[in-house]
Amino acid sequence: MKYKHARTEKRIAMGAIGTLMAMSGAMIWADDSTATPPLALRKIMQDMDKNMLIMADAISHKDWPLVERIAPLIAEHRQPPFIEKMRIMGFVGTSIGKYKAYDGSVVELAQAVGKAAKSNDVQGAELKFRTLQASCDSCHNEFQKSFVAHFYGKKDAVQ
């Protein structure tokens, strides 16, 4: 019986050692600062930027149907995966209310631009769009530089 018990203990010890080796290998790989994988938020922001440019162009050409189609793409933008969202919230810390307010402002203002476009309200669409741009700029001015430094180890906010 002692012999069988010793084999079980050896298996458990070997399993634990294997697990520790795998975990330390994963930590070394994750610590490679030269290959930091981009957060999902980066792609979300790139998509929003593309849609904002399309919307600006559509407004300048008075293409209200296009403005109306693009507005929901901005207002209903994707959200980062839950774990990434938790990392972001942890980083933002006590400024989370302000961070969420900027996102809420984007949703509200993009919807307002779409509504103004639907009713052919030129001045309303242009005003709401400028306010939307200002809201994006304010968020970027407040968070982007420190965000990029924290998550990508870069001191500048150029992506």
Image (cartoon, grey):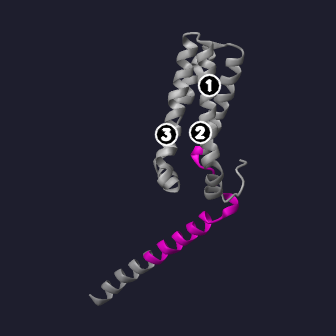
Q: Is residue 104 magenta?
A: no
Which amino acid type corresponds to the residue marked 3 in the rendered image? Ala
* Visible residue check, residue 44: yes
Residue at the image point whose x is 46% and y is 48% from the top:
82
**Is the residue under label 2 in contact with that under label 1 (CB below 8 Å)?**
no
Amino acid at dot 1: Phe
Ranked by sequence position, the earlier of labels 3 and 1 is 3
Residue 71 at x, y percent in the picture: 57, 23
* Depth check, front residue: 66 or 89: 89
Identify whether 141 is placed above or below 62.
below
Camera-nearest residue between 38 and 93 = 93
Q: Percent position (x, y) of residue 45?
A: 62, 39
Q: CA distance from mark 3 to mark 1?
A: 17 Å
In the rendered image, is residue 87 in sight? no
What kind of element bears circle 3? helix
- Mark 2 and mark 3 in contact (Cβ < 8 Å)? no
Question: Quick check: 40 left or right of 59?
Answer: left
Mark 1 to mark 2 CA distance (whole Å): 19 Å
Locate the N terminus and report the quarter of the image it occupies: bottom left
Q: Is residue 30 magenta?
A: yes
Crowding at label 2, few (<14), some or many (≥20) Cα neighbours within 10 Å? some
Instruction: Inspect the image, locate mark 2, and give the three-letter code of the amino acid beneath it.
Output: Ile
> Where does label 1 land, which residue?
129
Q: Residues within 10 Å of mark 3 (few under 14, many from 20)?
A: some
Figure disc tally:
3
Q: CA distance from mark 3 to mark 2?
A: 17 Å
SS at mark 2 in the image: helix
**Percent of width and height locating residue 43:** 62, 41
- Residue tagged 2: 44
Q: Is residue 143 above or below residue 26?
A: above
Please report the bounds of the magenta region as a residue range.
Answer: 16-41
